[in-house]
Image (cartoon, rainbow, N blue to C red):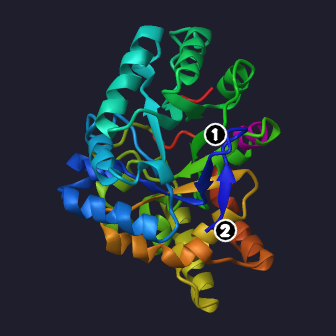
């Protein structure tokens, strides 16, 4: 497992992180047993993962609570990233949200505190000033953002060191390569990738649209009529998508590499990427990704991967918003 420092902080995070949203259960994830979640955390630590990502919005704080329980007596050697919701970006609400997260996480500091989404109705300067106060008090150690587009990211990075931008990035969703990724690289801000396996599409598990659950088919890769959870009006690119998936599976088979492993190894090679959030609901799902932790692919395979997925990149274009045709990114 490789590790990267968060900005100037000397805090090192693992190249793979455990995304803890599944711990919340609920409509998107289904029933989830807390003991399975805690086992997933312990197995992650055993395999070199030290970075755990959560948010108050994941099950109304439930994900944070479970993670806090899992890291009791393991806190000092592990890194927690959580988030402040866009509705809480006034100074007063930021402080309350932070203190609520600290209680749920059973800790007195948060390693990486991220603005979950921008809020264009509030002053970013006021938000940043309060975040700086929390950092001075030792309640947060570093400041990051999530889902910030080129303009929003450029604005906040002029006000404070922003160590990370958490963005949707995988071989089937490369929209950040057009604008946001180059800005992050220029500002020396690391990219944390969520949905690195395109919600399971890159595992080869789903080979036709009828196989794909609602929680996955709500993205803009699919037609607006495919999922009841859909929020966009796009036509999607389902035929192109499954042709690409077939080619990825064929490529993986030709090199005797699992499609998910190949996809994650491709993502590891992308400039600017410092960590990838891999969701797991139990220890067995952590172990499924273990080969990727140390795996590598050649530049030749990476280029073949690019060639296969370039048509989808061109179709999606520069809107990185997975859920909305009218992007919430600026």
Is residue 180 part of the magenta span, yes or no? Answer: yes
Specify whether 139 is left or right of 271: left
Q: Residue at x 53, y 26 (%)?
A: 138
Q: Secondary structure at mark 2?
A: helix
Is 250 in the magenta? no
Percent of width and height locating residue 56: 34, 34
- 153 lies above or below 29: above
- Which residue is labeled 2 in the image? 266
Q: Is residue 92 left or right of residue 271?
A: left
Q: Nearer the viewer, residue 26 or 36?
A: 36
Quadrant placement of the N terminus: bottom right
Q: Quadrant of residue 127?
A: top right
**For this rendering, which residue is in front, 239 or 147?**
147
Asked if residue 245 lies left or right of residue 102, the reply is: right
Q: Which x, y percent locates residue 44?
A: 43, 65
Q: Is 70 on the left-hand or right-hand side of 287? A: left
Q: Residue at label 1?
A: 164
Question: Does residue 226 lie above or below 108 as drawn?
Answer: below
* Crowd tier of the residue under label 1, counting other residues whose Cα lies within 10 Å: few below 14, some 14–19, many 20 or above: many
Per the rendered image, the range of residues in magenta is 179-184
């Amino acid at each position: 497992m490789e590790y990267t420092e968060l900005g100037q902080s000397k805090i090192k995070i693992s190249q793979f992180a455990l995304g803890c949203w599944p711990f919340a259960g609920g409509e998107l994830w289904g029933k989830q047993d807390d003991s399975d979640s805690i086992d997933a955390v312990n197995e992650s630590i055993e395999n070199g993962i030290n970075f755990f990502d959560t948010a108050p919005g994941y099950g109304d704080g439930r994900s944070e609570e479970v993670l806090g329980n899992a890291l009791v007596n393991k806190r000092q050697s592990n890194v927690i990233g959580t988030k402040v919701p866009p509705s809480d970006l006034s100074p007063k609400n930021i402080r309350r949200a932070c203190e609520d997260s600290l209680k749920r996480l059973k800790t007195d500091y948060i390693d990486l505190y991220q603005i979950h989404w921008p809020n264009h109705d509030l002053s970013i300067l006021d938000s940043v000033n309060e975040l700086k106060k929390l950092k001075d008090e030792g309640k947060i150690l570093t400041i990051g953002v999530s889902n910030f587009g080129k303009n929003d990211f450029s604005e906040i990075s002029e006000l404070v060191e922003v160590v990370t931008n958490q963005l949707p990035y995988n071989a089937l969703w490369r929209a950040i390569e057009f604008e946001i990724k180059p800005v992050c690289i220029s500002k020396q801000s690391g990219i944390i990738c969520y949905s690195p396996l395109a919600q399971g599409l890159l595992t080869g598990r789903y080979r036709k649209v009828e196989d794909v659950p609602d929680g996955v088919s709500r993205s803009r890769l699919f037609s607006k009529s495919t999922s009841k959870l859909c929020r966009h009006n796009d036509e999607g690119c389902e035929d192109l998508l499954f042709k690409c998936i077939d080619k990825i599976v064929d490529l993986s088979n030709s090199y005797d590499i699992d499609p998910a492993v190949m996809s994650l190894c491709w993502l590891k090679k992308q400039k600017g990427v410092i960590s990838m959030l891999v969701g797991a609901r139990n220890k067995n799902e952590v172990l499924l990704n273990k080969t990727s932790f140390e795996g590598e692919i050649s530049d030749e395979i990476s280029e073949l991967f690019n060639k296969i997925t370039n048509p989808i990149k061109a179709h999606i274009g520069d809107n990185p918003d997975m859920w909305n045709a009218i992007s919430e990114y600026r």
